[in-house]
Amino acid sequence: MLVLIPYSLFLTPSCKQNNWADWKVQNELWLVQNLRNEGVKKTAKGLQYKIIADPTPQDAQPNDNSTIVCDYTLKLINGYQVDGGKNVTLNLANCIPGFAQGCHLIHNNGDIELYIPCSLGYDYSKYVQNDKYNAEGSGTEGTQSYIPPYSTLIYDIHICGVSGD
């Protein structure tokens, strides 16, 4: 079960640059609270996850070179659903680090929830800190696919198939 924080404390996904610091803090606090939830674990690299089902541990387990077929949903900490798909084919070598690392934790036919901090997802901090780029987030602001800077990514994943080394 996720810790619920009143929705009014969260920025909308279309937060502006002057609110990025607030959004960053809210995402960091959410991750601290999430780790207190039953079944949520954390890897050495900071990925939080909860294995929902791993019914076939004798089946293939994805690795860095694997291609998987999966069903997934992606949402932000405020419940805003950004993306989703059924029977999506992905090469884990081309995925964000947190997604790939999480898929390594289960086998074919497994279900997992991933809570990916921005450092393992879309890490904009390097752009803001060195002021080389104007971090805009991922996607087009105001659209369903927009992901603000510093966002924690919450994936629900079911692996339907694994192929590759």
Image (cartoon, grey):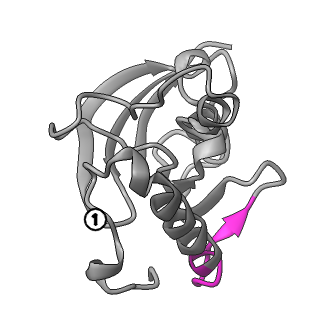
> Between residues 76 and 43, which one lies in front from this camera angle?
76
The residue at 63%/39% (across/down) is 125
Q: Main secondary structure of the magenta part?
A: loop
Neighbor class of circle 1 (other Cα within 10 Å; few <14, some 14-19, many 20+) is few
The residue at 46%/45% (across/down) is 109
In the image, residue 77 sits, relative to residue 13, either above or below, namely below
Residue 131 shows in the view: yes
In this view, which residue lies farthest toward the right? 44
Quadrant of the drawing holding the C terminus: top right
Residue 154 horizontal side relative to residue 60, left or right: left
Magenta extent: 33-42
- Residue tagged by mark 1? 79
Q: Is residue 40 magenta?
A: yes
Residue 48 location (% of width, % of height): 64, 60
Residue 119 horizontal side relative to residue 5, left or right: right
The residue at 53%/72% (across/down) is 30
Residue 59 location (% of width, % of height): 60, 38
Q: Amino acid at mark 1?
A: Gly
